[in-house]
Amino acid sequence: MPVTPISELNDRARDVFRLVVESYLTTGLPVGSRTISKFPALSLSPASIRNVMQDLEEMGLLAAPHTSAGRMPTETGLRLFVDGMMQAAEPSAEERRAIEAGIAEGGPIEEALSAATATLSGLSACAGLVMVPKREPVLRQFGFVPLNGRQALVVLVGQDGTVENRVLDLPDGVTPVMLQEAANFMSARFGGMTLREAGEALTREMEAERHALDGAARELMARGIAIWSHDADDRPVLIVRGQAHLIDDGTVADLERARGLLEQLEGKQEILDLLRSAIGASATKIFIGSENKLFSLSGSSVIAAPYRGADGRVVGVVGVIGPTRLNYARVIPMVDFTAQTLSRLMR
């Protein structure tokens, strides 16, 4: 359903709609006309308010969960509120300090991102999400450990101390001596390079035949580089923290919805695809409920913001996932500040 432009609402409808949405986001409960009539800024009788709420329901902005209940905003209504009426509140000094402290603890970048996600989850009472930037490790040492006549364990040691292992199928004719020669050559020749740089250098040297290793060893070296190059290109990492926040007092009555959302979080590839859609955004992006098919059944919202590397390009996305009734005015600026802080860290 197209979102009604805010300009089509008169002052009375705009005031009633804003109060209904703000009250619902605070309590998670449908809002009745008598509750709205008690706000001192609105000098309308409950009967007048009911008429306005009926008009807003016909416009698709409000809905009644059952006949005797009050009204609550629809997803279309929430989108109108977020885009046209919400007054965002900047993170408090305490919240900013908490986010900065978690990110500034040092250590590998993944630890800083995990800390930022945990802090954001705690402050927002949502599950925190962050997509870790793809990065190619700088090589320090290669090793090949024979497993049997047809396979070897390839060991890659990065300059940051990280170690990765892969099982590699060996070409015909490879001996333990060849494995050692290949490992020594690759460590000496490619130390200090990224995987991509090492692959390009290896290709050039193989074409020029500038080394004395035989054909089987050259094939072995090429396979070792190709494995990690492909893996580094295709392996984004997703960190999810604070899933327990998704089952709170407002969702206990709907355990199936909460269970479905937790199952969706287990499908990390789908979450990654969602976050990737926010990479091209210049600012924080908000997905409300069924606007994204991944959460069409669980009724959840995602707020995501891109963060940038030293060259100014987007390298990852940080955000939160929670119920559609989350406090957008508070959480959106919090996610945006976290993204800005991560961008400063990456420089």
Image (cartoon, helix red, strand yellow):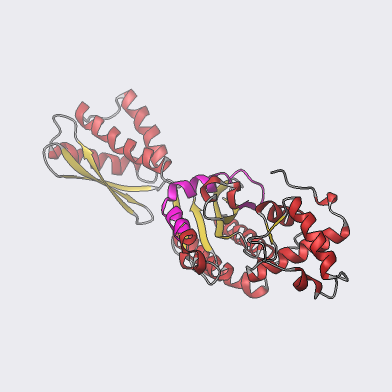
Picture residue at 35% right of the left edge, 45% below the top: 191
Q: Nearer the viewer, residue 30 or 289?
A: 30
Q: Magenta stretch?
A: 259-288
Picture residue at 46% right of the left edge, 67% below the top: 244
Q: Residue 54: which quarter of the image?
A: bottom right
Q: Nearer the viewer, residue 8 or 328?
A: 8
Q: Residue 217: which quarter of the image?
A: top left
Position in image of residue 221 (x %, y %) = 27, 35
The C terminus, quarter of image: bottom right
In the rendered view, tell whether residue 277 sits above or below residue 93: above
State yes or no: residue 286 in magenta: yes
Position in image of residue 75 (x %, y %) = 65, 53
Q: Residue 263: which quarter of the image?
A: bottom left
State yes or no: residue 254 in magenta: no
**Extreme left residue here?**
149
The N terminus, quarter of image: top right
Q: Nearer the viewer, residue 313 or 26?
A: 26
Picture residue at 34% right of the left edge, 55% below the top: 162
Would residue 339 appear left or right of 58 to someone viewing this image? left
Q: Nearer the viewer, residue 3 or 253?
A: 253
Picture residue at 82% right of the left edge, 70% below the top: 46
In the rendered view, tell whether residue 96 sits above or below residue 192: below
Position in image of residue 256 (x %, y %) = 46, 60
Asked if residue 214 shows in the view, the reply is no
Asked if residue 82 shows in the view, the reply is yes
Would residue 249 appear left or right of 51 to someone viewing this image? left
